[in-house]
Amino acid sequence: MSRLEIHDIFVIGGGINGCGIARDAVGRGYSVYLAEMNDLASGTSSYSTKLIHGGLRYLEHYEFRLVREALMEREVLWKNAPHIIWPMRFVLPYAKGLRPAWLIRLGLFLYDHIGGRKLLPPTRTLDMRSDAAGKPLKPMFSRAFEYSDGWVNDARLVVLNARDAADRGAVIRTRAKVTSARRDNGHWNIRVEDLRSGQIEEVKARLVVNAAGPWIDHVLTETVGQNNVHNVRLVQGSHIVVAKKFDDPRAYFFQNKDGRIIFAIPYEEDFTLIGTTDQDYEGDPHTARISQAEITYLCDAASEYFAEPVRPDDIVWTYSGVRPLYDDGASKAQEATRDYVLKADGGEGRAPIVNIFGGKITTYRRLAESMLDIIEKQLGKKGKAWTATAALPGGEFEATGFDAEVVKLKAVYPFLDMRLARRLTRLYGTRAKALLGLAKSDADLGRNFGADLYEAEVRYLVEKEWAVTSEDILWRRTKRGLKLGKEQAASLDEFLQGISPGLHNAAAE
Ligand SMILES: Cc1cc2nc3c(=O)[nH]c(=O)nc-3n(C[C@H](O)[C@H](O)[C@H](O)COP(=O)(O)OP(=O)(O)OC[C@H]3O[C@@H](n4cnc5c(N)ncnc54)[C@H](O)[C@@H]3O)c2cc1C
């Protein structure tokens, strides 16, 4: 498309919502341009608890619409991306003095029955004195409930949506900040600054989607020029990662004395992920960091349950994200609605902007469909809804076929160590072959940057997935950062700088 032409849709923000909408829209025949000011998924979308879940505790706040929609999405998303999404069982130990057993049972009954569950196994009760799930816990927990939800590699879900959108013709720009958007004669004039070269691109579009997550109000005031904007409540959530606390593949759902809950989840094979906290936040979402009080809270809450306490010294990594919750006036952060709200402004001659408030990773695909309903009203209908049954890149295999996929990859590349074959299948699914090419031995994969991160993978991430820095690769496209030291990260950065900078955005074309 020439620069003078007008795009149908301009999306501000390359988190899960922006990328999900770009993919859905371009697949229906709209022309789409998406700009992300940093890396894809560098906002809230890589700092989640990584659950594809109905949200058991949202039932307590009567969020039935959200819970039902989210529950229904569990199997839809699992089938679309069985490499990066898989089922997980959660063990909820019953503790006296907290929520009564009948209430938990009622919640889990609804959970099992309102969400279109077909493949996921139902809830059951565990005797923790005999079940392996009781082993790492203190002996006082004799009973527990076990139920199903899903796990997602959140950062990769974002990138795969962007990849698919680009494959279908969307323009995806990263390190590209939208600095101004102004209405002009029935369309939008948008200025996009390439933060690496300083170049400004002027883009025209019929409709703007504001998917800036926690920056949404900032975009409305600073970029679109609106006054008195206060739509979102920023709520920080932090996680800690410690060396593996238990061997069981199941995760734990712990209730705390303050009425809140935390999860302890098997993570990246050798670790346990514990989170999250919930506290109001002010400031730039990119600079959110865990506080000492949050560290103490998470360690203490987990230590109420684990026989071996979790200490601050055990922590190997932490991360904090900022939820952009729709400000519904709730007094406590954990009570603010987790549902999404889409609000359109414009139409009838004034170019429309549609703002996204709130949302979950779990419901991103349904949010995109709701957004497309609004877009169709504004721009006219094109193709039909299509994403419910369309695999994301690399996910073109059976939902339950992950192990078979690893075997297939090993058959083509017998030299691959089993751990590496599993890791590559988890991240890239059927596209692992595109990354490995004609390799016949480890040596053909090029330089090893440490922990089996080979040059072939790095080049693939640069060429196909918009990776630019070591952080993009070590902490978002992969989690090799948990294994590599600072020096290894620095030598990866040096290598990346040696690759032609022009290559990076070529992934978008
Ligand atoms: C601690 C925590 C735990 C969570 N756990 C879960 C969970 O387990 N399951 C679940 O389903 N959901 C979970 N969520 C919710 C989920 O993570 C968010 O709802 C979702 O990631 C929001 O995505 P987004 O695309 O709206 O925002 P973001 O991911 O923040 O994306 C917005 C993007 O816009 C970009 N941007 C901003 N301004 C500009 C500009 N001017 N120009 C260009 N780009 C711009 C930013 O750089 C950013 O990348 C959790 C959230 C948090 C904080």
Image: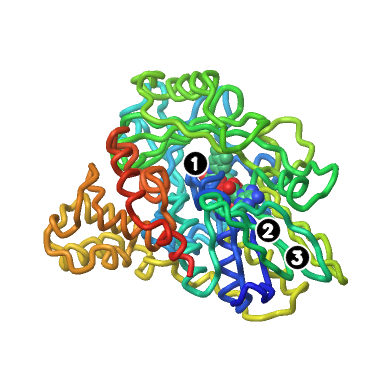
Q: What secondary structure is marked by label 1? A: loop
CB under 8 Å between discs 2 and 1: no
The x, y position of residue 165, in whole percent, is: 52, 68
Left or right placement of residue 305 versus residue 249 in this view = right
Instruction: Determine which residue is flagged by label 1.
Output: 49
Question: Does residue 402 sit above or below 168 in this rendering?
Answer: above
The x, y position of residue 364, in whole percent, is: 58, 57
Amino acid beneath label 1: Thr
Amino acid beneath label 2: Arg
The x, y position of residue 261, in whole percent, is: 55, 32
Look at the numbered disc 1 and say if its residue's Cβ is closer than 8 Å to ligand 1.
yes
Q: Quadrant of residue 366?
A: bottom right
Q: In which quarter of the image is the N terminus?
A: bottom right
Nearest-to-viewer mark from 3 and 1: 3
CB under 8 Å between discs 3 and 2: no
The mark that comes first in sequence, 3 or 1, is 1
Q: Which of 397 and 28 is in front in this view?
A: 28
Left or right placement of residue 397 versus residue 40 in this view = left
Instruction: Determine which residue is flagged by label 2.
Output: 191
Residue 188: numbered disc: 3
Question: Does residue 133 sit above or below 295 in this rendering?
Answer: below
Amino acid beneath label 3: Trp
Marks 2 and 1 sit apart, C-alpha to C-alpha, by 34 Å
Circle 1 residues within 10 Å: few <14, some 14–19, many ≥20 = many
The mark that comes first in sequence, 2 or 1, is 1
